[in-house]
Image (cartoon, rainbow, N blue to C red):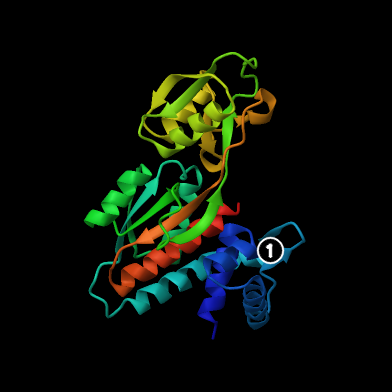
Amino acid sequence: MLDATAVQAFVLVADLASFTRAAAALNSSQAAVSLKIRRLEETLGRRLLDRTPRLVRLSPDGATFLPAARELVAAQQKAIGAFTQEERRIGVSISHHIVGADLTTLLQHLHRSDPGLVVEVRITTSAEALAALKEGSSDCAIVLNHDGKRRSGEVLFKEEFRWTGVPDFDYRPGAVLPLATQASPCNVRAMAVSALDKAGIRWSEVFVGGGAQTIGAAVRAGLAVAALARRVAPMGTVDVGRRLGLPPLPARDVVLLSGTGSATKRQAIKLLGRSFRALAGR
């Protein structure tokens, strides 16, 4: 008989290419995850993973076993919910400032961990995400903590912000800095312009976008620079802050807040938080 928790740990390590990130997703330790997989390998009589100090990847036997391992994890989730009539569904509101290309991997991870879970995702501002949670249209919100007052939520990780621009963006110290921002009110916009004002750097909004993706498009087009989180910065852009002499930007906690709900929803939200935290380390 196979240990289902060990199989789940193997699938997570395969998906995240890291014992550390898999341990974070399972709310466990790296040593415990490694031990589970080692015992699984002993049970199967096969080496499933090739381990080096910098790399974890599937062995040929691991690649062969992975599809069956996914099916076993899915079957376990189905068995656990066999007597539950409630549909496993969660509504999630996420700040557009913290969700980037890794959203695809996050959704894949959630689906593989619980194929029967229906996830409704809304990408919006932190203020709107919190409002949706308060009114009950979302079960949880993942937002940036700008004021330090939301202490009831779970801190998932700290997000770094940077001045993002194309590598050859032309700006000379003393000139007016072209800026791409979110429409006011926006806490990231306020953070950016406050840093510039304190540094005595003149700025002018040349593009106002409705979300981080549209702001990123303006930056990638070379129109301006923008204060963007590392995870949402578009391909082809770099951190231009030091080269242009711009002031450093503060980091912000990414916080998961949830309302009251069923045990099924609480478990799903817990899985979401662990997955998001694990992927943040990539």
User: Residue 131: x and y, percent?
Assistant: 28, 50
For the residue pair 242 and 73, the one nearer the viewer reads as: 242
Residue 144 vs residue 129: left or right?
right
Q: Please identify the quarter of the rendering in which residue 48 is found.
A: bottom right
| Residue 137 shows in the view | no
User: Residue 229: x and y, percent?
Assistant: 53, 40
Q: Please identify the quarter of the rendering in which residue 200 is found.
A: top right
| Residue shown at 28% from the left, 67% from the top | 260
Looking at the picture, does residue 256 appear above or below residue 94? below
Q: Quadrant of the N terminus?
A: bottom right
| Residue shown at 37% from the left, 45% from the top | 126
Residue type, label 1: Ser
- Secondary structure at badge 1 equals loop
Give the residue number, with chain letter if any, for mark 1: 59
User: Residue 230: x and y, percent?
Assistant: 57, 40
| Residue 163 shows in the view | yes
| Residue shown at 32% from the left, 51% from the top | 130
Q: How many neighbours does mark 1 have within 10 angstroms: few (below 14), some (14-19), or many (20 or more)?
A: some
Looking at the picture, does residue 112 appear above or below residue 233? below
| Residue shown at 57% from the left, 38% from the top | 249
